[in-house]
Amino acid sequence: VVEKGQPEHSLVTTCAYCGVGCSFKAEMRGEELIRMEPYKDGKANHGHSCVKGRFAYGYAHHRDRILKPMLREKITDPWREVSWDEAFAHVATKFRAIQARYGKDAIGGITSSRCTNEETYLVQKLVRAGFGNNNVDTCARVCHSPTGYGLKAAFGTSAGTQDFDSVEHADVVLVIGANPTDGHPVFASRLKKRLRAGARLIVIDPRRIDLVRTPHVEAAHHLALRPGTNVAVLDAIAHVIVTEGLYDEAFVRERCEWSAFEHWASFVAEPRNSPEAVEAVSGVPAAEIRAAARLYATGGNAAIYYGLGVTEHSQGTTTVMAIANLAMATGNLGRPGVGVNPLRGQNNVQGSCDMGSFPHELPGYRHISDDATRQTFEKLWGVSLDNEPGLRIPNMLDAAVDGSFRGIYIQGEDIVQSDPDTHHVTAGLAAMDCVVVHDLFLNETANYAHVFLPGSTFLEKDGTFTNAERRINRVRRVMSPLNGYADWEVTQRLAQAMGLAWHYTHPSEIMDEIAAATPSFAGVSYRRLEDVGSVQWPCNEAAPEGTPVMHIGHFARGLGQFMITEYVPTEERTGPRFPLLLTTGRILSQYNVGAQTRRTANVVWHEEDLLEIHPNDAENRGIRDGDFVRLASRAGETTLRARITDRVAPGVVYTTFHHPATQANVVTTDFSDWATNCPEYKVTAVQVSPSNGP
Ligand code: SF4
């Protein structure tokens, strides 16, 4: 809790919640933070903010914060406070002992999309240069990994194509699998302003999200599809565009691989991809699909914004590719007002991916098998690097259950609460010899940890975050770390304990190293960020001012690549035992698993997760509004209260996942995206029945 009053001075920093990346003036008296004031010159938010960034920072001083390192031999033992020196020495000894006994690949690390670019870079460097393998992954695995894969394949870069300002030039906006009002509120305000000024809106979402009908805004088309049928609907839209000749032939001939386009065009033109055929699969009337397709293709500048309702599916990557196909076919790329724009969830999910957090990629999305890239880092780091991709998070857990993976360093990520199939996650962690959790609080994952290293909040460190529009924003240290060390210093001390000669004295030196080895960051430095406020990558000799809109004139890969996007139904099926489909999302006042927002005053706006259920489904089950219900799937069950609403269609239920008491992920399955293993959170066959309570 912070006191109000007159500030003595202020520092400009960046919100640590969502991927909009709003800038704030942190107003202080001494080292005491008095208030967060939205910063008028912030290029992502232009002086606007939401209730999270403005008010939900009290967790920094919450009594639950752990400020001393702790150890225990077994996870059933009580924690024992130790010195930092003892903690680092203990972890180094344990990790080296595991590697001596089980091989160098028996340990790994997980980076955090909540931490800075510099901190993320150091964790992947520790794994690659210190552990000697590529077993590093990120929480982006469970959210936007399909974005990285799909957009790289289509355009050559794993990032959104536009800046947020671009929406001011859009005539048509297609929002699919995203709920900006709750998930990206400041961008949602920009979008609504544009819609009120006359832009037309298409929403593709199983749920009637706020944007569908909100004061002075009404979607031209809401395609309320059955969860899991995104690809079918997008292919049907493409079918209309191709068969009615609505594509931009000049753009495709000049900018894309023409033969791939022809192949794709004949694929989507097949009768099985027609709106009439897809209506049966998706539940969306064919006439609505046809009308939406015509509007997208002929309504002027058309921009697509999407979220986790696109990526968290067994066909997440295919869906991203289908979106890219639509934008290329209609020439909606390479200028303001158009494009393909993933609304990134966490504050630095773009950055954590940029920094080489995936087991197959070094910083800048360059494959680990690429000799020239590997040699760059080998020279810089003074080590030789493994050229084989390492393990992804689910593979690490599989290997742990099998006994070949025995130790992990997890920075700022609660995989027990946030990853799918909780029982599998806990089984994997419980099987390891040394689980190191580096976090603010004793989260659910810490229940399985042998070592706890206290983390620092965004207020306690210098660094940078990269938002959803590739904007690199400065994070400035507002107060000294309560535990004595910023997260980057903790990772450095751990690396030193493992024998690495790291001597960074400030995160700016880490950014200099990133810039030296990563072409898209070549022009980025703290000095530059001081001068201009923020820049969007690529920022280098070719683009010294950064790049608000990508792919002008040509794609990063040269010619744009059309992909065949065959709809494959999810293996998760409804049936007599589990007749309903569950999908999930967030609400405005809370953030993800709620570790931070639940420890702020914002908790009064959301005290529990609720299950939205259609009146017909509720009546059939004898459920009244506010009743406790049992939510069960093939994977597990939980109990929560029902909210009866026609926001969801019959046959569909919806909940948020902010409270550990609900543990919504005990019911989600272990199905995942074919290309990236991103979990299929958005489609789970469930049954809902009355319950007496937890
Ligand atoms: Fe801005 Fe997102 Fe922070 Fe809200 S949560 S203030 S929209 S960055």
Image (tube, rainbow, N blue to C red):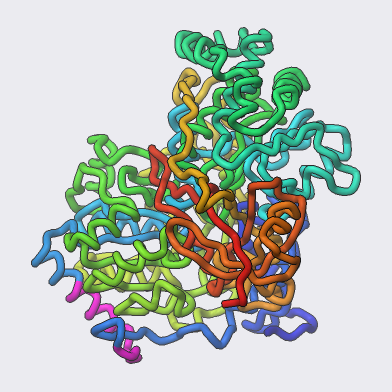
Q: Front-most of 329 and 626? A: 626
Dominant SS of magenta comes to helix
Residue lying at the far right in this picture: please name it: 216
Horizontal side of residue 546 vs 396, given as left or right: right
Q: Front-most of 195 and 338? A: 195
Horizontal side of residue 595 vs 437, given as left or right: right
Horizontal side of residue 446 vs 5, given as left or right: left
In the image, is residue 675 above or below residue 275? Answer: below
Which quadrant of the render holds ligand 1?
bottom right
Which residue does the image show at 34% across and 75% down from the upper left? 448
Which residue does the image show at 26% across and 35% down from the upper left? 370
Q: Front-most of 179 and 149? A: 179
Q: Position of residue 385 (x, y in %)?
A: 20, 48
Q: Position of residue 608 (x, y in %)?
A: 65, 72
Which residue does the image show at 41% across and 59% down from the upper left? 421
Q: Is residue 78 magenta?
A: yes
Q: Position of residue 15 (x, y in %)?
A: 63, 62
Q: Front-most of 430 and 198? A: 430
Residue lying at the far left in this picture: please name it: 101
Tell me if I can see residue 157 in this picture.
no
Image quarter (top left, top right, bottom left or bottom right) of the N terminus:
bottom right
Q: In the rendered structure, which segment of residues is drawn in magenta?
A: 77-94
> What is the quadrant of residue 40 in the picture?
bottom right
Q: Tag count in the figure?
A: 0
Q: Is residue 246 magenta?
A: no
Q: Position of residue 77 (x, y in %)?
A: 29, 88
Horizontal side of residue 641 vs 348, given as left or right: right
> What is the quadrant of residue 88 in the picture?
bottom left
In the image, is residue 427 above or below residue 44? Answer: below
Which residue does the image show at 31% across and 43% down from the upper left? 360
Tell me if I can see residue 72 in this picture.
yes
